[in-house]
Amino acid sequence: MTMAASGSCLLPLIPLLFTAVSIVSATSVPRTFPHFLKAAPFARRLQDKEAASDDLPSHIEIKDDNGVGLPIQLAVIPAWEIFLGFSDHQKLIKGRMTLNTVYPPSAHQFVSRPDLVVDLENFATGEKHLLGTVTLWDPIAGEEMISASKVYVGEFSQSLTSFEMSCYPFDYKEVFFRIGLQKPADAVFTLTLVCAGEGSVSGIDPVSNLTMCTWPAPGSYVGFQWQNFTCRSIDTALIECTMKGIRQSQPLITAYLWPSIVYSLMGFLAFGLDVRFAMPRIATTMLALVSLTNLRNQVLTLVPSSGDTSWMEEYFLIAVTFMFLNLVGHTTSFYLESVGHLQMQKMVNKVNLWGMLSIFILVVLARLHVRDCALVDQVQSGAWVGVSSVVVVFVFVFLAWYYRTAFKELCQKIKDLPSKGRSDWHLDHPQEATV
């Protein structure tokens, strides 16, 4: 790409750049720096220079024969252009990001391409394209400025940031981009965040009191509804940009949660079959168990392998556990039918069908409620937990009344267990019993 071709891409941004920088400018500074960059306080500059010198051998120092005056300030204009993908499992966001660096010609006395010392630290894999440079003119300061851009297309790692997944899929994500100076360039240059471009808004972060610039987040959403692209000037060598996105949970509900609900209901409805159909009852429950396990394995490929267990993972664990309890219920039902306790066998069937189903719903809703997810209304989730608790109590009270004869017989057998155990022990140890 020729310099003219590269410059033509940046020409529409030049009026916006100088409009923005004229607003940011509050005081005039020496001609060594562009007028829109405020000189750092002397104490802070000295502290930064001493800290940067720690990155060099003790007998090496920065050479400044021409008296340029250090540090030289680099104006950085970041821009997020398009989303290409997002991976929870690998902790990556994929897309295209541009860094435009504006600097004075005096920076060439220290580095041939000063824009190359400004780097995106968490850029993982992909392509980095270096565009041509454009010479600009600052009419207020009466000096030339040079603008150079880099385009990053690929994956940006989020492994060094907190990746909260406890409320998945009812959650939001905040991704980070760290723009820093390559060492030991921080001994010569400092970074200054500049707001420029369509829709840019400058301000001060009310929480951290840092300089802040905000741009709208464009492009496809790749499973999220992304909010603004916001950058903050952390210090003279680091700019941190963030984006917060609300996950679109509907595709995940359709692909995983709804089929799992159907499979779970299959496992419970197997108790509606007559006890004579032992094979279909067991086969239906086993089919539900295998299907839920397969779905859970698919979900595990979507979430990170480390960190807290997400609500969706826990939901599948609960569902698989209840399918195992259903198998235990079938076994109990078959045993009671074989020994002639028909009423008790019918009661066990109804308890596993309606009682365990209501408990399953209660546990799933309660586990979602206690996670206190930001995107889940706590009032509504609490109300659903309350209603589910009432349903559980009602189901068991009704079954105990409806099968009261079998229930009394079961209670009596439970009471007789200690005495029966003692009598069996006496029969097995007659001599000790006589003593």
Image (cartoon, rainbow, N blue to C red):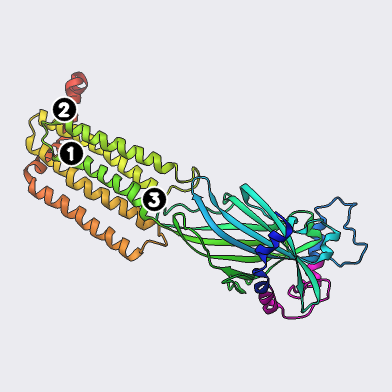
- The circle on residue 270 is 1
Residue that badge 3 annotates = 311
Q: Nearer the viewer, residue 115 or 246?
A: 115
User: Was residue 380 drawn as part of the magenta stretch in this picture?
Assistant: no
Give the mark, 1 or 3, whose residue is nearer the N terminus: 1
Locate the N terminus and report the quarter of the image it occupies: bottom right
Q: Report which quarter residue 146 is drawn in.
A: bottom right
Residue 317 to residue 10: above or below? above
Q: What is the crowding at mark 3: few (fewer than 14 residues within 10 Å), some, or many (at least 20)? A: many
Amino acid residing under circle 3:
Trp
Residue 180 to residue 257: above or below? below
Q: Secondary structure at mark 3?
A: helix
Locate the C terminus and report the quarter of the image it occupies: top left
Asked if residue 275 lies left or right of residue 33, the reply is: left
Return the x and y of residue 242 as percentages of the image width and height: 57, 61
Work out whether residue 99 can be spotted: yes
Q: Report which quarter residue 341 is drawn in.
A: top left
Give the mark, 3 or 2, whose residue is nearer the N terminus: 3
Q: What is the crowding at mark 2: few (fewer than 14 residues within 10 Å), some, or many (at least 20)? A: few
**Distance from label 1 to label 2 (Cα)?**
39 Å
Chain part drawn in magenta: 18-46
Q: What is the crowding at mark 1: few (fewer than 14 residues within 10 Å), some, or many (at least 20)? A: many
Return the x and y of residue 117 as percentages of the image width and height: 75, 56
- The circle on residue 321 is none
Residue that badge 2 annotates = 423
**Distance from label 3 to label 2 (Cα)?**
49 Å
In this rendering, the label closer to the viewer, 1 or 2: 1
Amino acid residing under circle 2:
Ser
Q: Nearer the viewer, residue 158 or 99?
A: 99
